[in-house]
Amino acid sequence: MTDTATWVAACKLNELPKEDVKRWDHGSKSFAVFRTADDRVFVTDDICTHEYAHISDGFVMGTTVECPRHAGCFDFRTGEALNPPACNRLKTYSAKVENGTVFVQIG
Amino acid sequence: MKSDVGQAEDWPTSTFTLNDAPVEKNLSEHGMVIVGAGHAGARAAEALRKNGWSGKLTIVESEDAMPYERPPLSKAVLSGTNSFEKYPILVDGFFAANGIEHIRDTTALSIDRNSHLIELSNGAELPYHRLLLAPGAEPRRLNVIGSDLGKISFLRSASDANRLASWLQESAKVVIVGGGLIGLEAAASAIARKCDVTVVELANRLMNRAVPEKIALAAKLRHEKEGVCFKLGCAVKEINGVNNVSSLRLSTGEILECDVVLISVGVEPRVSLAQAAGLDIDNGIAVDKYLRTSDVSIYSAGDACSFADEASGERIRLECWKNAEDQAYVVAKNMLGGEQIYSTSPWMWSDQYESTIQIAGFPARGPFITERVCLDGSLLLFHMTETGHIAGVSGFGSLREVGRGVRFGQLMIQRMLTPGVGDLCDYTVDLRSLIVPAVVA
Ligand SMILES: Cc1cc2nc3c(=O)[nH]c(=O)nc-3n(C[C@H](O)[C@H](O)[C@H](O)COP(=O)(O)OP(=O)(O)OC[C@H]3O[C@@H](n4cnc5c(N)ncnc54)[C@H](O)[C@@H]3O)c2cc1C
Ligand code: FES
């Protein structure tokens, strides 16, 4: 597979508020698509690594997202778990914006 | 052990006062001892190492298990979704990798404060320099005839949860005595296992102590939808059965047939060890703002300790995960000579079915309630003071609305904002917009 073949359009940038997150379902998976206050986009797995919760239902501040269930925090740029009860990383994916559309590299 | 961990002699002993007792030898060689490897104890052990304590560190635990999270016991473990081993507090091998001696299946029996020794149930004596008491809390008993029959349990430990889970067979008649948070989580788990569930509660409403009335009512309706039957305003007068429980007699005279009983009528702080050692006890092991007991060499954290709340001056005790977690970090710093003040910002959650209850701050201190019903039916309550400040926020419903709403409420509390009532109750107003100027700053 070529590099370009793995980039999939996820959503329009303007559908995604600044400093917020949106869920994107693709195939059987859910992804969390983040937009920072300065317009960078990042993508992670959407299911919390602690118990079960959609990270896209969480609370974004700066470059962290807080899980809505038990407030475990992740740095969504790297997926790093920042505080208990979250302790395992969230998987991250490369993302880019082209002509107002957010693309995610999966696979 | 990690190479960046400092040496024992780097330790700032000069900041300590050792209880005015003559120091005959270098007590710091005795190291740190923690009683209780529950949430507060395990996290404090981790924090002591992270804060540079490289000397001896011993943690004593009555249970024969590695430290585990208790919240999943009434949820995933009881409903059979996962085993408790899936919820460790520390990463696998943490104690060994960090040179921490974990003495399990062993109880601390007494403390000799003069000699700085604790006596263990395995016959050993353990010297300490600084001691942390993190013994947690004990389920309250029900003093009625028959409460020692078979198939009656409390729910505090993993073995309690495993035993109860094995009794929750399909169609089993389960009676839960006590409509508090843990009782109701257990009710939801028993429903997931297709049991027939009745909750008996002394008060006229559920979750009387911890949860605002409207939230409790919303949760009750949710449980009733799932088929849970409630007997409110009723006391259990007698438990009957031959070997195992077979029925309960209530104060109304009603007889409830049952196969399994969970007694979940609150907890009492485990104070006996501290009390016998002559430490001050006041609604728990009394600690000062540094989480130090009345003996400067002994600290306490978690469900067992009571502390003076900064705002009200009241001596309070919090029985929730966040409190144990936060106190562990503070106490570890202070055991190492720091002077960090523990200031609480209470927050707790309870998961029942797919819904969540979350409560932050002190709802009882905000008599004026502003209610927001979200588009998906989730309920958020902002508990406001006379000055329009938010004292507490609570919610019941979806993770998205309640998780975010309570988080925004916490920010409003922290920043002492006075948002307009009209905006708070209007679900079309984004709560973020009410804190945005502060976020940007
Ligand atoms: C079933 C259940 C569900 C819960 N759900 C939630 C929830 O959803 N949200 C929330 O915020 N909180 C919840 N909690 C509360 C939370 O788990 C507790 O607040 C937290 O565990 C307190 O930590 P602790 O270290 O003080 O006590 P514990 O975790 O109870 O640990 C104390 C430990 O000390 C040991 N010990 C006691 N005495 C001795 C002795 N003399 N010698 C040696 N060892 C001793 C005990 O065996 C125990 O392991 C729940 C608790 C339970 C039981
Ligand atoms: S499910 Fe996300 S922190 Fe627990």
Image: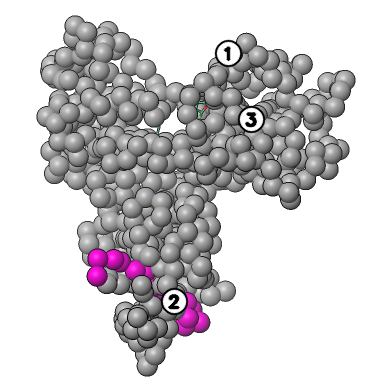
* Residue, disc 2: A94
Horizontal side of B96 relative to B389 (left or right) equals right
Q: Where is residue B424 in the image (x, y as percent from the top left)?
A: 35, 64
Q: Residue at x 77, y 45 (%)?
A: B6
Whether marks 3 and 2 lie on the same chain: no
Q: How far across and down, in percent of the image, does residue B50 sit?
A: 67, 47
**Callout 3 crowding tier (Cα within 10 Å): few <14, some 14–19, many ≥20:** some
Q: What stretch is highlighted in magenta?
A: A27-40
Q: What's the amino acid at mark 1?
A: Ser
- The residue indicated by pointer 1 is B121
Question: Mark 3 vs mark 1: same chain?
Answer: yes
Q: Which of marks 3 and 1 is nearer the N terminus?
A: 3
Figure check: B417 above or below A85: below
Picture coordinates of residue B299, whole percent (x, y): 66, 31
Would residue A36 be counted in the magenta stretch?
Answer: yes
Could you tell me the amino acid type at mark 3?
Glu
- Chain bearing mark 1: B
Residue B438: assigned label: none
